[in-house]
Image (cartoon, rainbow, N blue to C red):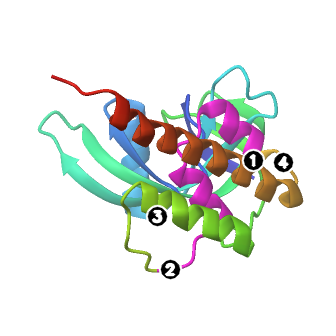
């Protein structure tokens, strides 16, 4: 499948919202096409650790601000993950790049087991996030943890049955850090 491509050094997770600032002429053209024809596009992770050429299939959610210079602030949502076979300099007759990709068709709504869910609720409580309007998918939990690029890449490339263990380990570490921070408040007083 051939899609428009936006190479960046980030790796979106399914369901995640990503803010972007559009300023290059070729990506201004991509934004115009996304608005006028409702096309999806890829964000291909350009980092050297991305040996599998993984990226996120993105959908424009909204244009937040337009500047007089033609630049824009937008928000896009990751709707799937892909592996890229080939990056092309131009998508069809456009200025922006394209890519031949194979979609993963991830189940972005896959729910965690009760142990992971409870741990995530505890994590949110420790961060003073108290409103829980819905259940959280595995990918939403991963996005909330602010994983670095290496951990995002590792998470995406794990088989489904290992994703749960990975997230439990990450949550336990985050909770440990938060608890240590809370304990340190009792010992250190800032002027």
Q: Can you say whether 170 is above or below 60 in the image?
A: above
The location of residue 60, given as percent across then percent down, is 43, 58
Image point 32% across, 37% down: which residue?
21
Asked if the residue at tag 4 contacts the one at tag 2, i.e. Cβ–Cβ closer than 8 Å, the answer is: no
Q: Which residue is mark 2?
A: 134
Name which of mark 1 and mark 2 comes first in the sequence: 2
Q: Which residue is mark 4?
A: 158
**Disc number lying in front (2 or 4):** 2
Q: Is residue 51 visible?
A: yes
Between the residue at mark 3 and the residue at mark 2, the CA separation in whole angstroms equals 28 Å
**Disc number lying in front (1 or 2):** 2
Image point 76% across, 64% down: which residue?
105
The location of residue 62, given as percent across then percent down, is 33, 60
Q: Report the span colored magenta.
A: 134-155
Between the residue at mark 3 and the residue at mark 1, the CA separation in whole angstroms equals 26 Å
Mark 3 residue element: loop
Mark 1 residue element: helix
**Residue nearest the observer in this picture, 66 or 117:** 117
Q: Is residue 112 visible?
A: no
Q: Which residue is mark 1?
A: 156
């Amino acid at each position: 499948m051939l899609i428009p491509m936006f190479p960046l050094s980030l790796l979106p997770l399914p369901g995640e919202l990503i803010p972007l600032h559009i300023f290059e002429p070729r990506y201004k053209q991509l934004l115009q096409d996304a608005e006028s024809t409702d096309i999806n596009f890829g964000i291909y992770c350009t980092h050297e650790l991305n040996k599998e050429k993984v990226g996120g299939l993105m959908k424009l959610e909204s244009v937040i601000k337009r500047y007089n210079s033609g630049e824009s602030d937008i928000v896009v949502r990751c709707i799937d993950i892909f592996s890229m076979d080939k990056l092309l300099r131009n998508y069809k007759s456009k200025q922006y790049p394209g890519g031949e990709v194979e979609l993963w068709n991830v189940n972005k709504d896959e729910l965690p087991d009760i142990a992971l869910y409870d741990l995530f609720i505890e994590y949110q409580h420790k961060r003073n996030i108290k409103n829980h309007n819905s259940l959280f998918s595995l990918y939403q939990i991963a996005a909330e943890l602010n994983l670095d690029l290496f951990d995002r890449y590792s998470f995406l490339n794990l088989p489904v049955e290992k994703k749960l263990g990975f997230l439990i380990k990450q949550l336990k570490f985050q909770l440990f850090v938060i608890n240590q921070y809370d304990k340190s408040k009792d010992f250190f007083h800032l002027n």
